[in-house]
Amino acid sequence: MAVAAGAAPKKKADAGKPSAFERGLAALAQYRERTESVTVPRSHIEEIPDSDGVVEVKLGVWISNTKSRRAKLTGEQLDQLAALGLDWR
C-alpha cells in the first residue's frame, strides 16, 4: 500500500518510552509532591527525569487538554488522575 504524496508514514511507538499521558501523570505527581496542590497555572512547565535526561512537560496545558478530552480516557486513566486529586467523573 502506497503512502499518499505529502503524507508522513506512521511512526512506531518507541518501546519503553512513556506515553504523553504517562509523562503528564509523572509531572503532575511531582508537582503535587512539591506544592501539595494540583492547581497548576496554565503556563507552568514541569521538568521530569527521563531516560534521556530531563523532559519539560507543559503541565498546565496538559491538564487543560486532558480535561477537555476526558470522555476519551479509559477508566484506568481516570482512576490514576483521581488518585492524584483530579476526579473528573
Image (tube, grey):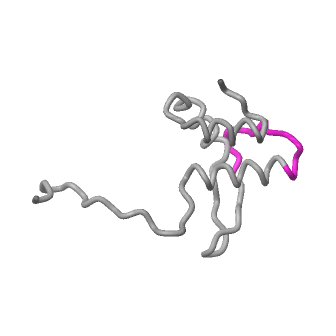
| Residue that sits furthest to the front in the current view | 76
The residue at the point 78 percent across, 54 percent down is 30
Q: Which quarter shows the C terminus?
A: top right
Q: Which quarter shows the N terminus?
A: bottom left
Q: Is 53 placed left or right of 19 in the picture?
A: right
Camera-side residue of 24 and 40? 24
Image position of 28 with respect to 18: above or below? above
Determine if the magenta segment contains residue 27.
no
Image position of 47 with respect to 61: above or below? below
The x, y position of residue 35, in whole percent, is 88, 47
The residue at the point 10 percent across, 59 percent down is 2
The x, y position of residue 57, in whole percent, is 63, 54
| Residue that sits furthest to the bottom in the current view | 52
| Residue that sits furthest to the top in the current view | 89
The x, y position of residue 64, in whole percent, is 61, 35
Q: Is 1 placed left or right of 64 in the picture?
A: left
